[in-house]
Amino acid sequence: MSNARIPGRNFLFVPGPTNLPDRVLRAMNVASEDHRSSKFPELTLPLFAQLKKVFKTTTGHAFIFPASGTGGWEAALSNTLSPGDKVLASRFGQFSHLWIDLAQRLGLEVIVQEEEWGTGNNPERIEEALRADKSHSIKAVLATHNETSTGVTSDIGAVRRAIDKAKHPALLFVDGVSSIGSLDFQQDEWGVDIAVSGSQKGFMLPAGLAIMSVSKKALAAAATAKVRRAYFDFNDHVKANASGYFPYTPALPLLYGLREALNILFEEGLEQVYKRHHHLAEGVRAAVRAWGLKLCAKEPKWNSDTVSAIMVPDGFDGAKVIDIAYRRYNLALGAGLSQMAGKLFRIGHLGDLNELMLLGAIAGTEMAMLDVGIKVTPGSGVAAAQAVYRAAPLLQA
Ligand SMILES: Cc1ncc(COP(=O)(O)O)c(C=O)c1O
């Protein structure tokens, strides 16, 4: 890459932050204003109501914290649990790992169920662990809905059924950072007590907001929870949010951006948003098959519709593919993290995307792989994805 300006758009295909729609960019271009004015709730109250529709909850309380998804994890745990409380969590990728690490740092005792990376939550093992916990000392189950590091989606409804079958009262906390707003998510139906998301993925915004929805049961747990918390205290927000305010200065442009992003999501329709993500992902998966490569996801049931983690053949370094794609073709792919470093690269396919954008990413990936010596047939991935996209185009003319 020379130092000259690179014309055209950067092809941003990391699995978050995602592309910002022009409408969202324009909506965020606002002057500062008084967040204590009598007019301010006209912006905020509808946001809380609309967010509940995205989480698919009628009884949950939507929270908007100035933070990233990690802050949402901390808010979930610190508001509901006490030091030494036991939580049950499965680890099968870098983000499920980091949530466990955060829980341990908050002084919780985490019972870790190790699952192979490339798989996800195992409802049978969760049920077994809960049945064995006769004294109900496990206070919460942590489940990562979409493990972004390996491109794995888990069945959260099945995790709920496992908890119910064990007749266990544990709260269910779900990381939906790279799923909510892109993949079907049903807080009430699945009995999710806290769902955590972030602004920079399905919500098509810059990072900066932790967006959450909390059940009545989880809010009640805050009354006795003793993990120290201040900035992220649910109660401060509940009180201020009731009239459309926040306990401290909100990130105003992001709130205007969120309003527009929600408009965009509802104009398309959530069900169509999920279908589009599946369709775009199917094209990427067809390309991977045509290249003769494998996904990190061990079986199709784990395939994520928001991100594909693609294993590079033995003897090659996934980081080189990513670097060439970036430096030569202005294409940003996601890196392999932790134990997957060098072994894979990721194509994020979530947010404001369509078929031709994906074809550009697939073409660039193919060129970068050829450049590092991976023997894929030139054009094969693009042709395979084209076939998927032509068979059922998003725009039915
Ligand atoms: C599944 C998942 N959980 C949590 C996080 C952490 O979120 P953040 O980086 O917004 O703090 C990420 C970030 O990519 C993620 O993909």
Image (cartoon, rainbow, N blue to C red):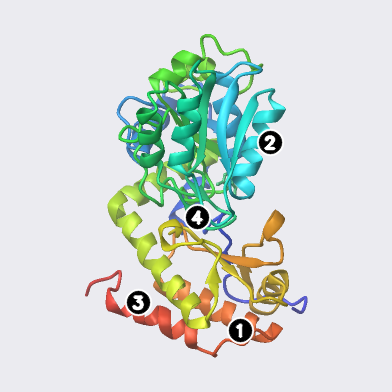
Asked whether disc 2 touches disc 4, contact meaning CB atoms under 8 Å apart, the reply is: no
Task: Give the quadrant of residue 167.
Answer: top left
Q: Which residue, given by chain and number where applicable, does mark 1 sit on?
A: 367
**153 sits left or right of 251 in the view:** left
Of mark 1 and mark 2, the one earlier in the sequence is: 2
Q: Which residue, given by chain and number where applicable, does mark 2 sit on?
A: 101
Gap between marks 1 and 4 measured at Cα: 26 Å
From the viewer's side, name the closer residue of 62 and 282: 282
From the viewer's side, name the closer residue of 165 and 363: 165
Front disc: 1 or 4: 4
Give the secondary structure at mark 1: helix
Q: Which residue, given by chain and number where applicable, does mark 4 sit on?
A: 152
> Could you tell me the amino acid type at mark 3?
Val
> Could you tell me the amino acid type at mark 1?
Met
Name the residue at 31% across, 50% down.
270
**342 sits left or right of 305 in the view:** right
Front disc: 2 or 3: 2
